[in-house]
Amino acid sequence: MQLYLILAAAFMIWSGVITTTAYYKGRTAGVSSATETCNNTINKQKEESAAIMAVEVANVAATEKKLHEFKDNREVQDAKNKQEVDVLSGRVRALSGIIGRLRDPNAGRGESDGITKSGTPTDTSNSVYNRAEASGILSKQLTEFLFDQAESCDQINLAYTSCREDSMNIRGLK
């Protein structure tokens, strides 16, 4: 009888080991199956993400190329505008004549040699300044002030033109 008890105990231990092993193998197989499914899903998402990323990187590269081309074109156009302003400023300075002063285009109209339209002589002494004032030549300080103001205005206009073009392009109005 003891032999039967020992055999029964051995059988129970053996069947417990078999059952436990089968249980863990099944459980591990289920976990492996779930892990494999998750890994496959993750790999699929990685491939999709890589494709999307490649498209976006290409879009960014194309946009950067367009921006660089626009910037280069803008710099060329700004250089041309600055050159034109410099030429015009040089012409204005050249028009100031040998004495380097501007002349009032409305001064002295109808007058010559110190005589007004009515025929009465004006008081012009022989000093250079009085003759300059009578002929409409502006003072050196006023001439320099006007040159400085014109140059400042030209710089502002160049900056405005450049910024306006950029702003219009950014807003898509052009």
Image: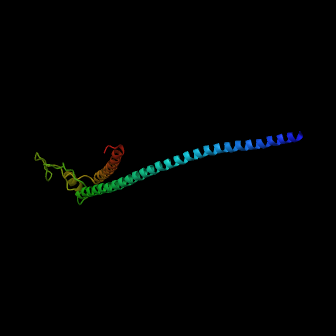
Residue located at (42% from left, 50% from top): 59
Say which of 109 and 63 sits in front.
63
Residue located at (84% from left, 42% from top): 7
| Quarter of the image where the C terminus is located | top left
Residue located at (67% from left, 43% from top): 26
Q: Position of residue 69 (x, y in %)?
A: 36, 55
* Residue most extreme to the bottom: 98
Say which of 135 and 126 sits in front.
135
The answer to which quarter of the image holds residue 15 is top right
* Residue most extreme to the left: 119
Q: Position of residue 111 (x, y in %)?
A: 14, 50
In the picture provided, is 161 more to the left or to the right than 61?
left
In the picture provided, is 114 more to the left or to the right than 15?
left
Say which of 41 and 163 sits in front.
41
In the picture provided, is 57 more to the left or to the right than 174?
right
In the picture provided, is 13 more to the left or to the right than 39?
right
The answer to which quarter of the image holds residue 79 is bottom left
| Quarter of the image where the N terminus is located | top right
Q: Position of residue 104 (x, y in %)?
A: 21, 50
Q: Position of residue 11 (x, y in %)?
A: 80, 42
135 to 31, vertically: above or below: below
